[in-house]
């Protein structure tokens, strides 16, 4: 399994900051391998101004959900709707 690190531009922080973290994980079967599975874990922590926590949470959660979906599809060969790709 590959680990990918992406550089994401950080907002200028000129006041005390908060961090928003979202993590998702799933154990998925490996296609063609009976009784074998693999673990997918995706997470992102992002600094933000304290008054922006809810907005940043939505964006971070959407990014994690999208990345998790892509990793799941790549590993299993099917989409989240159960259809083969």
Image: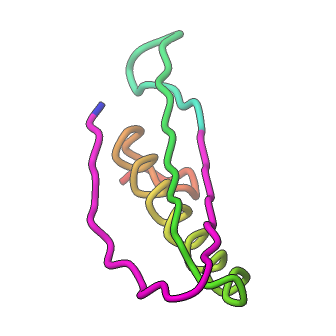
Furthest residue toward front: 15
The residue lying toward the viewer, choosing from 14 and 62, is 14
Instruction: Give the image location of residue 25, x and y in percent.
Output: 59, 41
Query: Which span of residues is magenta-colored?
Result: 2-25
Quarter placement of the N terminus: top left
Furthest residue toward top: 35
Q: How is the image coloured?
A: rainbow
Residue 13 painted magenta: yes
Q: Considering only vertical position in the picture, is 58 above or below 44? A: below
Residue 11 painted magenta: yes
Q: Considering only vertical position in the picture, is 34 above or below 25? A: above
The residue lying toward the viewer, choosing from 76 and 44, is 44
Residue at 32 percent across and 72 percent down: it is 8
The residue lying toward the viewer, choosing from 15 and 38, is 15
Instruction: Give the image location of residue 2, x and y in percent.
Output: 26, 36
Residue 4 placement, left or right of 34: left
Instruction: Give the image location of residue 80, x and y in percent.
Output: 55, 55
**Location of residue 59 by image quarter:** bottom right
Instruction: Give the image location of residue 35, x and y in percent.
Output: 53, 10
Q: Considering only vertical position in the picture, is 9 above or below 63? A: below
**Location of residue 62 by image quarter:** bottom right
Q: How many marks?
A: 0
Residue at 61 percent across and 48 percent down: it is 24
Residue at 69 percent across and 80 percent down: it is 53
Residue 27 placement, left or right of 1: right
Please name the predominant secondary structure of the magenta segment in the image.
Answer: loop
Quarter placement of the C terminus: bottom left
**Location of residue 58 by image quarter:** bottom right
């Amino acid at each position: 399994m590959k680990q990918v690190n992406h550089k994401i531009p950080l907002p200028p922080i000129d006041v005390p900051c908060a961090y928003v973290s979202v993590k998702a994980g799933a154990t998925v079967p490996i296609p063609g391998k009976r009784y074998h599975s693999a673990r997918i874990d995706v997470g992102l922590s992002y600094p933000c101004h304290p008054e922006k926590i809810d907005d940043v949470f939505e964006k971070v959660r959407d990014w994690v959900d999208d990345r998790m979906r892509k990793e799941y599809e790549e590993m299993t060969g099917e989409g989240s709707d159960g259809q083969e790709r």
